Amino acid sequence: MPVLVMKFGGTSVATLDRIRRAAKRVGVEVAKGYDVIVIVSAMSGETNKLVGFVGETSPLYDAREYDAVVSSGENVTAGLMALTLQEMDVPARSWQGWQVPLKTTSAHSAARIEEIPTDNINAKFADGMRVAVVAGFQGISPEGRITTLGRGGSDTTAVAFAAAFDAERCDIYTDVDGVYTTDPRIADKARKLDRIAFEEMLELASLGAKVLQTRSVELAMRYNVKLRVLSSFEEQSDDAGTLVCAEEEIVESNVVNGIAYSRDEAKMTLISVADRPGIAAAIFGPLSDAGVNVDMIIQNISEEGRTDMTFSCPTDQVARAEKALAEAKERGEINYHDLVADTNVAKVSAVGIGMRSQSGVAAKMFKTLSDEGVNIKVIATSEIKISVLIDRKYMELAVQSLHDAFELDKTA
Amino acid sequence: MPVLVMKFGGTSVATLDRIRRAAKRVGVEVAKGYDVIVIVSAMSGETNKLVGFVGETSPLYDAREYDAVVSSGENVTAGLMALTLQEMDVPARSWQGWQVPLKTTSAHSAARIEEIPTDNINAKFADGMRVAVVAGFQGISPEGRITTLGRGGSDTTAVAFAAAFDAERCDIYTDVDGVYTTDPRIADKARKLDRIAFEEMLELASLGAKVLQTRSVELAMRYNVKLRVLSSFEEQSDDAGTLVCAEEEIVESNVVNGIAYSRDEAKMTLISVADRPGIAAAIFGPLSDAGVNVDMIIQNISEEGRTDMTFSCPTDQVARAEKALAEAKERGEINYHDLVADTNVAKVSAVGIGMRSQSGVAAKMFKTLSDEGVNIKVIATSEIKISVLIDRKYMELAVQSLHDAFELDKTA
């Protein structure tokens, strides 16, 4: 029988009633003839509670014990989901990560999936079991310790199971009903997309859209797993939600398919850096070593051997960046007058695979913002994305006017 | 290094502060030179919450899923205890049942321990680890599913580890500071015993004393594991609490060492039973099949081929007993006029290994009760115990007067 993977996030299993509701959705797919693998998160709030316990117990905790503690919420939901399905006369059983076994690296709290053997679960499917309920977010290391995949890891678990079992589709049930052209809370013309390409979803996810975890999209793209994002709180038709799929499966597409934003970017400017060949490496090497995720970079024209260097990074990494650069200065590796952090900025991005073949997107974006009197501080582009850093107070205006300019409220 | 097993119950690990307090006790034993195996229960209230979830989800639940759900509380405490010890610079790690692996039968929710391999944990001790923190109450079945040992199973886990690792002692930390001659809430002259024999503890446990789970005492007796019961809420000296040990290690002992009571007994009387050879089997066979734990039995003298048959059983099994007997009557296997259940009774017992060698204990007990005007309804005796069923209103009086009569407030 064809296999379907269905993933339910924390809000979708937050109470026994919601678990029942989710189980009914599973029952619908079983009735259609699918063997279903259900991936569950912990009841919402549970994982945070456990993370709090660990943090309070030990500020510099042993990540192996952290994983053993925080993975327990998913075990509870997996068992309860299996019981709920059994109550509905759907043959089901639960699997914890080590029982599958979902094999991962030993990088505790941020482990990567290495292998998912299918024989164990397939044997049960062959025996008449119709639903395997798997605790998301967790696995087992080569040393036999429990690992977790990091926050949002249940999405990744779901996609990895879909790839391993060659599933027809991986449905991600969440508290929104799909992927939108932009955040509907900011632009009321925001439109739900029926389909979106992996590449676009990947950019949107890393640019601040919270629907799917970046790693899960990467994995789906690599193994060409059809991902569907849909709401667990609404009655669902067969084409509900948004399908994240390969470019080839999207017949018509707008040039720009999404406007993303992020408030969590800071603009850092090194003033009057002594310029010399290799100065970029001298600056960004220590930042990288300190775990600072530098996003955009611009360098002013050098005058009299000195230049200004501007880059952006997540606001919560500003302190770390300042420390790394001050230390590099102390070691004499770089020389600058001042370091100015501006956390009063926002990043707004336009994303669309259509950009590859169509020119003029950047020009249109800059003109739109200019017409609204929005000053662009930093620009960064990729093949299918243009991002700008602007004053935070203009963020909503920028999102709305770009959404209008690229006519995202209209289908292609 | 010698091994010590220390078990902390739910109230002893109810909060992060209490876990820290328990960890400090562990640290004291490590400093003495012991390698320590710590067995932890779930934070108090957690297991009940999970049991509630399961019951609400599925009244006739799959015990395998029940076990997967309710075992998760211990995993949390085990991880937190290991982290707390690490914070105190005590090398420690956690083990879940399947990681040991603690092998059990497949009797889910009431599994029996089959084997505890020691190589895994001993290798870590040899490596310098000083404390193995093991999640109590849980194991793994031959099928690779999670099992639980039934309520109070963490005591059993602790004793089984002590036996497997040939531990010097198994310390059970709880919310009382030892085993008392009787319940101090009823008799203020109750005295904490320094030592008590396995057999006595076993009788007291099964007669209603809630300090230790019966199975754990049985296991300790079989493998001659020295069990110490002590409070996790008090500073402890080396001879704190009560040592449960073999008879040979108790030099002087009173004839009677404990007075136990239980409010949970009901007296059932079958009135005017048609007497014939085999009638006892015809009555108690169906009761046993229905899972009714019959404790005491008395049969009146038969008159004109009819007799009254009285027995006691736990009050919560009365309905089941009535149903089983009514059905047996319907099938024509037994014949009686009426069945009267009296739940307004209590069982009071005197326990002591000294009874084996000393006569007159029963006579003294009956006289004491008679002097107080307490009418005895049913009597049952074993080698080291005498139990009587009396009106519940006399229970406290009976306990106090027996405690005085056998001079339990004085040491031998």
Image (spheres, coloured by chain):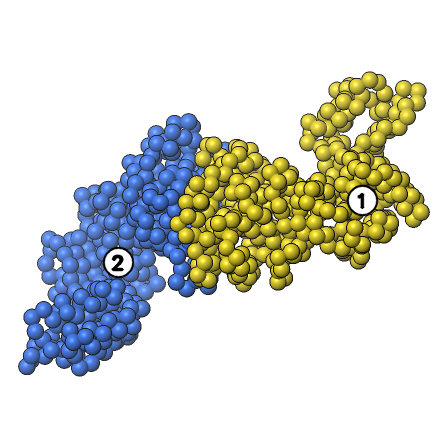
Chain colours: A yellow, B blue
For the point 37% across and 39% down, the residue is B101
Dots 2, 1 in contact, CB < 8 A: no
For the point 93% across and 47% down, the residue is A371
Vertical side of B145 occupied by A359: above or below: above
The percent coordinates of residue A272 (x first, y second) are 88, 26
Q: Chain of mark 1?
A: A
Secondary structure at numbered mark 2? helix
Q: Is residue B132 left or right of residue A252?
A: left
For the point 35% across and 54% down, the residue is B109
Residue B273 visible within the image: yes
The percent coordinates of residue A220 (x first, y second) are 62, 41
Vertical side of B399 occupied by B69: above or below: above
Instruction: Specify the quadrant of the image occupied by residue B236.
Output: top left
Q: Nearer the viewer, mark 2 or mark 1?
A: 1
| CA neighbours of label 1 inside 10 A, class few (<14), some (14 to 19), many (20+) | many
For the point 11% across and 78% down, the residue is B274
Residue at image mark 1? A255
Residue closest to the eye, A72 or B232: A72
Residue B397 visible within the image: no
Instruction: Specify the quadrant of the image occupied by residue A276.
Output: top right
Q: Are marks 2 and 1 on the same chain?
A: no
Residue closest to the eye, B26 or B112: B112
Residue closest to the eye, A257 or A79: A257
Q: Which mark is residue A352?
A: none
Q: Chain of mark 2?
A: B
Secondary structure at numbered mark 1? loop
Residue at image mark 2? B206
- The three-letter code of the residue at mark 2 reads Ser
The percent coordinates of residue B13 (x first, y second) are 46, 49
The percent coordinates of residue B94 (x first, y second) are 45, 39
Q: Is residue B317 left or right of residue A219?
A: left
Mark 2 to mark 1: distance in Å? 77 Å
